[in-house]
Amino acid sequence: MVDRLANSEANSKRIAVVEGCFGTAGQPLAIPGRVLIGEGILTKLCRKKPKARQFFLFNDILVYGNIVIQKKKYNKQHIIPLESVTIDTVEDEGDLRNGWLIKTPTKSFAVYAATATEKSEWMSHINKCVSDLLEKSGKSPSSEHAAVWVPDSEATVCMRCQKIKFTPVSRRHHCRKCGFVVCGPCSEKKFLLPSQSSKPVRVCEFCYEQLSAGTLGGGLAVRSDSYSRSPSKFPSNNVSDDEDEDDSSD
């Protein structure tokens, strides 16, 4: 089915529409063999609060962006190669329901669909696309993924020392290895995580020691990524100086 659609006029027009909605804020998406499988709005769990994002699933990439005008204009385009993606379901909790984790070596995050049926369809299509890509390439599924960041509002004190309270002076930071919300003194060091950045990134003292000793591999998770939270726990006025790469307001 995908192969038949690859060179169809209808597929080309659909991809052109997506490109037009991103305009100069996005990269060209039309390449030979690429097929737009589906699209829809998902709630992305950002660091300060859940936010609606427009997602587009292609047979080789997952694209998402901020909604400026629904079905007309999007910005802050992000492109995720599906070969490196793994997904895991997230248990329902409170008003955050029908969610799953999208995990890649570079960035991992939780998203939520409007219904259980939508969740099932998204996860099924993503898994099928990833499976087809890996079968064609002969590669193995990715065993390494970035930690899912703990939302700012989930930590009123440093998650490592359990002592320093966060205030406008004692600001929140995120360890790029474990995703914990930590204080400045507990995250003064940096370590090179090639899958996330070409430059050393902020890590907490615990992860730094483990990484330096070679006991913490690139694919070893320090914390459990399977969590979900209620939107009421995500106030938008949390103080932090680590901006979400997704959106400077996330």
Image (spheres, helix red, strand yellow):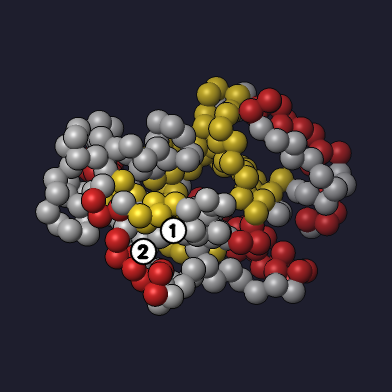
Residue 216 position by quadrant: bottom left
Which tag, 1 or 2, sits closer to the chain's start? 1
Horizontally, residue 96 falls left or right of residue 33, namely: left
- At 41% from the left and 69% from the top, the residue drawn is 211
Q: Could one spot residue 59 in this view of the protein? A: yes
Q: Could one spot residue 90 in this view of the protein? A: no
Question: Amino acid under label 2?
Answer: Tyr
Question: Amino acid under label 1?
Answer: Phe
Crowding at dot 1, Cα within 10 Å, few <14 / some 14-19 / many 20+, comes out as: some
Residues marked 1 and 2 touching at CB (< 8 Å): yes
Image height of 152 relative to 21, above or below: below
Image height of 208 relative to 7, above or below: below
Which quadrant of the rendered structure holds the N terminus? bottom right
Horizontally, residue 91 falls left or right of residue 124, namely: left
In terms of depth relative to the viewer, which is nearer, 79 or 8?
79
Image height of 72 relative to 144, above or below: above
Task: Please give the residue where the numbered disc 2 appears in the rendered image.
Answer: 208
Name the element at disc 1. Answer: strand
- At 43% from the left and 32% from the top, the residue drawn is 248
Q: Tag on residue 75? A: none
Real-space Cα separation, disc 1 to disc 2, in angstroms? 7 Å
Task: Please give the residue where the numbered disc 1 appears in the rendered image.
Answer: 191
